[in-house]
Image (cartoon, coloured by chain):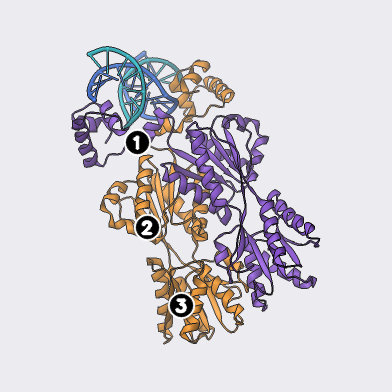
Chain colours: A purple, B orange, C cyan, D blue
DNA sequence: CTGTTAGCGCCTTCAT
DNA sequence: ATGAAGGCGCTAACAG
């Protein structure tokens, strides 16, 4: 069933059908006839053929490192929701942090003429090393979420990780906590910015920073609590670089008999769904992954629509629940 | 840059270029000339134009309920990895469990002529209620992961949920547990099969089944423990329908002073990363989401290639750690 | 093996 | 407002 079949059965020309499909004004009488035939056959125009002409298949790609990590899942989720509500289809690409793999994905996307690309995370800045790739990407609308890509049609949206932890730490200080330690996960750019926020806040209050570090995500909370116990460091609050780390810490310290939120305050980072998996519910820094993702999608569509776009930066906020 | 430009500069006809692009035998001399021009301009044929002719854009859709839930993320991840390694692009659709939304997605996919669809989870069985939708889907290759769709070109791969829980419950019984209760999340086909496995095992041992139920995922474990406490039911083991539920239960009961794995055994379901977020580490039923997803992708490509395909079923296994 | 030609399904001038 | 015709970039016959 194609536009010719519809035209024939409705007794009009294909261009009239095309006009009907594109909401251009045609005689009401013809409109009715076409409408009936379209409904009768459940006809839907081929996006591929449309794409061949219009150069757009209403397709957008979201590049993430690993959809299995909740933070990226949330990013993909929010972007997908926004874009598909506006009639775009979304291709999610799991690059696994592999440069070659990422470039292969990009070639594949270029081949189908995606309308735009959203990169999630500063890790994709590595693309700036590849001139040839940048050249190919040069004219396609791009939004980089917390990163930056050096092409003509590219814009960025950032979130202020350092300020987020700084504010959360301040909050603990203002509550009267004096022995605030930090649980760090990994040592990425972003992770180090968070740590700096913690240090800045403590310095202002003339308190001594104490940092424990892990490269384990899932069992990281337990490992860090073990380190803490062995260190015999006194503590009345823990600032964590990740919700999952905080979750493990809360669970472990609860089992040891601590009253979380009373004997000791614990704050996570991400304001993810995991905050509700904690008991008591976890206070956490909201780094606005959903907002930045939604905004990424909106900005991308603005670029596509030829509107003016500027880089943006969002502040983190503190979501206070029960653990601090 | 299109096939005409390449042909002109290489001094051949477009069909020769087309043959070159499709790996058909042409004179080596011409091949070299074309190769050079293609390399010079980094020319890549338009998948859209190819799609218009060949009816395939090498595009496959994976439908999941919510990519933010680790189980579905793992499914999408594995399918994506398999498919994109074989040159297919993958569209991941988050339906959020909404029927209308799912159908809207399907329309969108049909419009771009996807080569096939993978449905993850028995929840998509609801489509069988919609005759019109089935009709539209009738000829497109479909794999249903743990479900079944009533169309001509549709096959299923199942994992034996019932057997998985049955075996796990048996394991508890054999350990000498006598007061085994069940924590159920939702009431989908799959969820009910799991419950049945539990009941079957108890019946064989002449034990009385006791079931608590929730529709909350994140805080579900706590809610169920509260229900349990209020019920004053005696218990020495809990079989849970989801790892996340088990995680909440472990955390909560630990805080109440129970020694998990000693006073009380707890088993989860999914063998997800969360098993390591529990303290002690969680024993869980492995429902082989990665295996079935990879296999789904392979089966889908078999259908597309016209090979013979049969439904498949995989057994669950029990991954014993420390919580039981 | 190579080139010519006719579509694939749609949108878009351009006359009418 | 409507219809005829050309073109989007490619593949697939069909001749040569």
Residue A224 location (% of width, % of height) = 72, 66
Q: Which residue is mark 3?
A: B182
Same chain? Circles 1 and 2? no
Kindly identify the residue that appears in the image at 64 percent across and 77 percent down: A255
Q: How many badges with numbers are in the image?
A: 3
Dot 3 alpha-carbon crowd within 10 angstroms: few under 14, some 14 to 19, many 20 or more: many
Q: Nearer the viewer, residue A28 or B93?
A: A28
Q: Which residue is mark 1?
A: A46
What element does badge 2 sit on?
Answer: helix
Same chain? Circles 2 and 3? yes
Residue B73 location (% of width, % of height) = 51, 56
Q: Nearer the viewer, residue B197 or A72?
A: A72
CA distance for labels 1 and 2: 25 Å
Residue A94 location (% of width, % of height) = 55, 47
Chain letter of disc 1? A
The answer to whether residue A248 of the structure is visible from this angle is: yes
Kindly identify the residue that appears in the image at 68 percent across and 35 percent down: A129
Pointers 3 and 1 in contact (CB under 8 A)? no
Q: Is residue B63 left or right of residue B222?
A: left
The answer to whether residue A219 of the structure is visible from this angle is: no
Kindly identify the residue that appears in the image at 26 percent across and 53 percent down: B131
What element does badge 1 sit on?
Answer: loop
CA distance for labels 2 and 3: 25 Å
Q: Which residue is mark 2?
A: B124
Chain letter of disc 2? B
Dot 1 alpha-carbon crowd within 10 angstroms: few under 14, some 14 to 19, many 20 or more: some
Q: Is residue B20 left or right of residue A310?
A: left
Chain letter of disc 3? B
Q: Is residue B1 above or below residue B324?
A: above
């Amino acid at each position: 069933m194609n536009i010719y079949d519809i035209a024939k059965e409705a007794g009009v020309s294909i261009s009239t059908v095309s006009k009907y499909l594109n909401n251009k004004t045609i005689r009401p009488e013809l409109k009715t006839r076409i409408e009936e035939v379209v409904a009768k056959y459940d006809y839907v125009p081929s996006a591929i053929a449309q794409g061949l002409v219009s150069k757009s298949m209403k397709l957008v790609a979201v590049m993430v490192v690993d959809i299995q990590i909740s933070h990226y899942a949330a990013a993909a989720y929010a972007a997908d929701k926004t874009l598909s509500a506006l009639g775009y289809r979304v291709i999610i690409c799991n690059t696994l942090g592999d440069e070659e793999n990422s470039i292969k994905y990009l070639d594949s996307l270029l081949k189908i003429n995606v309308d735009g690309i959203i990169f999630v995370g500063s890790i994709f800045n590595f693309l700036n090393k590849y001139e040839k790739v940048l050249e190919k990407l040069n004219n396609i609308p791009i939004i980089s979420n917390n990163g930056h890509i050096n092409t003509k049609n590219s814009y960025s949206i950032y979130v202020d990780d350092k300020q987020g932890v700084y504010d959360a730490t301040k909050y603990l200080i203002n509550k009267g906590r004096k022995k605030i330690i930090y649980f760090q996960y990994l040592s990425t750019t972003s992770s180090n910015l968070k740590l700096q926020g913690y240090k800045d806040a403590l310095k202002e209050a003339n308190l001594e920073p104490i940092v424990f570090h892990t490269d384990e995500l899932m069992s990281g909370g337990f490992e860090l609590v073990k380190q803490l116990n062995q260190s015999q460091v006194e503590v009345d609050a823990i600032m964590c670089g990740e919700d999952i780390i905080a979750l493990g810490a809360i669970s472990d310290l609860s089992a040891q008999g601590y009253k979380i939120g009373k004997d000791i305050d614990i704050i996570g980072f991400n304001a993810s769904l995991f905050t509700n998996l904690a008991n008591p519910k976890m206070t956490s820094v909201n780094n606005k992954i959903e907002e930045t993702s939604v905004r990424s999608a909106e900005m991308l569509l603005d670029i596509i629509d030829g509107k003016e776009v500027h880089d943006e930066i969002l502040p983190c906020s503190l979501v206070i629940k029960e653990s601090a």
